[in-house]
Image (cartoon, grey):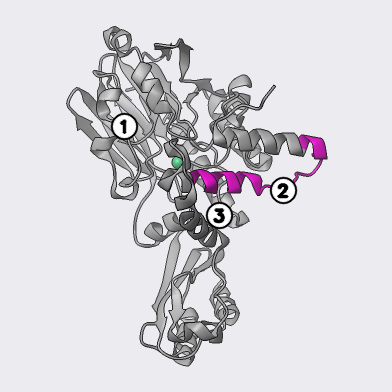
Amino acid sequence: MPRFAHMSDIHIGAFRQPELRKLVLDAFDAAIDRCIADRVAFVILAGDIFDSNIPDLSAVSRAAAKMNEAVRSGIRFYAIYGSHDFSPNYSSIVDVLDGAGLFTKAEDREDSQEIVRLRFVKDPSGPMLCGISGRKLSIDRDDYARLDRKALEDEPGLKIFVFHGSLEELKPKSLEMMEGMPAEDLPSGFAYYAGGHVHDRSVSSLPGRENIAFPGPLFATEYSELLPLARGEVRGFYMVDFDDHQVLGVEFVPVNVCQVAEVYYSVNGKSAGRAARELLEAAESVDAPGKVVLLTVEGELSEGRTSDIDFSSIRKRLLRSGPLVVLSNISHLTSREVALEAPLSRPAVVVEKELFEKQIARVRSHDPRLTGEQGVSLAMDLLRTLKESRRENESKAEFEQRMSAAGLGVLGVKAEE
Ligand SMILES: [Mn+2]
């Protein structure tokens, strides 16, 4: 029975720590190995394959080698951009891989003022695919408003729609505040809707639209997504069985590349001395060889200062059992003597976000992308993009040009000629 695989939001290149970057790639390798072993006909990558549109090339090269291995065994890849690897001027790594013949872009479109027409790509195994990429901001809503759905719905055959965005009807709690699109924006009557963008896994059906699937990441893409792994959440992708007419079954395939352990400690009502002692004991009892260890310390100290806790020795103690990497989060740790001490060092990204949230109220604009939550997220995106440093072998001019293009890309505007 023929099968295809559906993955999304892999975010290759995510994380600052090399160990975690490698795990993201390990997860991709494991998923592709499974696709090769299962002899899938094709793999759908529903956006955010990479964490940025020009990711670290050593990561790209490893991922491309794996895809090439799959391609040589007869597997085809269909991809769209996500909000992270989107490029307004077709200069994303997704375009490079498309040009190199590793991917086929599932978005083949013809645009006019009033209408967006999509052409199907027919896979040799039978199914017909088409889709719409994610964009940096919410511009893809406009794509759906202009989409000629009727033409797509009238086409006979087993059809798959690939998209990158959340649906109002199926929005998970984590995206509650974000605007999704109504399911009726999607053409009806397709056999499978290969979604991306939503990082919480689900398969659901709505009237006229069956098998709306969001696989979520294969591993994790940021600290907050590691925690659920420590608490038993499993991540992976979907394998879909089909025949000439319909989808016969959707199976979730778990991908497990590394165990994640959590050390949680609340300092509530404790003195700094006691917390320091108990944290050292807790660190001593952790046996996590080869694991990702997350140290979360939060709460309010009843006595003493947060700086009285020597986190570097706690860390050293944790490293004794040979974990792959130790990450700590003490951003919600405070003390009553807060006025007496210097601000605790917190992750830069948390401080940045708070500052933007404070300042955004002063921005007066009718453009919703520049105000409120969208404005904060745009500012964060821009800052993240512009933080990049010059690459080895990159000239100053190339660097400036790349930064300016990336900045404009985030803002979704074009440079003046
Ligand atoms: Mn994503």
How far apart marks 1 and 2 lie (CA) works out to 36 Å
Q: Is residue 9 visible?
A: no
Number of the label disc, if any, that sits on residue 20:
3
Kindly check if marks 2 and 3 are in contact, taking CB atoms under 8 A apart as contact: no
72 and 121: which is toward the camera: 121
Q: Pointer 1: what residue? A: 181
107 and 241: which is toward the camera: 107
Dot 3: element: helix
Amino acid type at circle 2 is Ser
Q: Residues within 10 Å of mark 2 (few under 14, many from 20)?
A: few
Q: Is residue 381 magenta?
A: yes
Q: Pointer 2: what residue? A: 389
Q: At x 70% / y 35%, what residue is drawn?
A: 402
- Tell which circle, 1 or 3, labels the residue nearer the N-terminal end: 3
259 and 263: which is toward the camera: 263
Q: At x 45% / y 75%, what residue is drawn?
A: 333
